[in-house]
Structure formats: structure tokens, C-alpha cells
Image (spheres, rainbow, N blue to C red):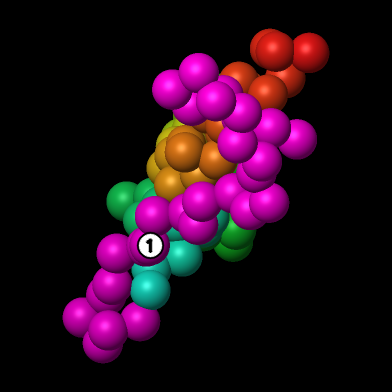
Amino acid sequence: VAEVMNGKCQDIYRLPVPTPCSLNTRGHPINLRVPSPLPPTEKQLDISMSRNNAPGVPTLLYNHMDRWKKIRQRWREASHRNQYRYRDSMKILKEMFERQ
């Protein structure tokens, strides 16, 4: 595999290393693949509550779906942040693919 730089072909044997992760307070790298957990809902559901006081099925379903949509969005954002670390390698691979 060769890359053209300044009109000359250059062989590529390695891709650039990803940019390093930021460090937490202890000096350990932060795992960008896993997002921070979503805090629990403000009100816990009491399973022993009477049917008259319990929220309806549509309310429970809406709250459940809303929470999981937020969780899914956090995972997507974490994935994008992690993939951004590899942007230099992806740029080289994309150029190689487009040249074929």
C-alpha cells in the first residue's frame, strides 16, 4: 500500500496511534466507550402500592421509553467520542479506499 505525499509514493506500514484518552483524578485513562450512568428517576416505583394510587400503564411506558432513549443517546455519543480518537487513521484509510 502506498500513499502519495508531495507527488511521491510512500509505503504505509503502520497507522497513527489514536489520540490518548484524558485521565481521571487518580491518573487512570477514562474509558470513552462506556458513558457515565444516567441518574435514577426521581421517584421509585413501589410495587406494593394499591392500584388506585399506582401510575397507569401509558405513564409507565412513556417514562420507561424516555429514559432508555436518553441512555441510547449517551451510548451513541460515547461511541462518537471514542471513534474521534482514530480520525487520523480513518483519514488515511479513506484516502487509500478512494484511490482504488
Residue at the farthest left position: 25
User: Which portion, as a residue range, is magenta?
Assistant: 1-28
Question: Which residue is found at the position 55% from the left and 40% from the top?
Answer: 89
Nearer to me, 74 or 7:
7
* Residue 16 against residue 91 in the figure, above or below: below
Q: Quadrant of residue 93 in the image?
A: top right
Quick one: SS at disc 1?
loop
Residue 22 locus on image (x, y percent): 29, 64
Left or right for 39, reference 87: left
Question: Which residue is found at the position 65% from the left and 44% from the top?
Answer: 12
Nearer to me, 22 or 16:
16
Q: Is residue 11 magenta?
A: yes
Residue at the farthest bottom position: 26
- Total tally of numbered discs in the picture: 1
Left or right for 51, reference 21: right
* Residue 4, visible in the rendered structure: yes
The residue under label 1 is 20
Question: Which residue is found at the position 72% from the left and 19% from the top?
Answer: 97
* Residue 57, visible in the rendered structure: no
Left or right for 73, reference 22: right
Nearer to me, 37 or 20:
20
* Residue 15 against residue 1 in the figure, above or below: below
Position of the N terminus by quadrant? top right
Residue 55 locus on image (x, y percent): 51, 35
Q: Quadrant of residue 51 in the image?
A: top right
Q: Residues within 10 Å of mark 1 (few under 14, many from 20)?
A: few
Q: Quadrant of residue 74 in the image?
A: top left
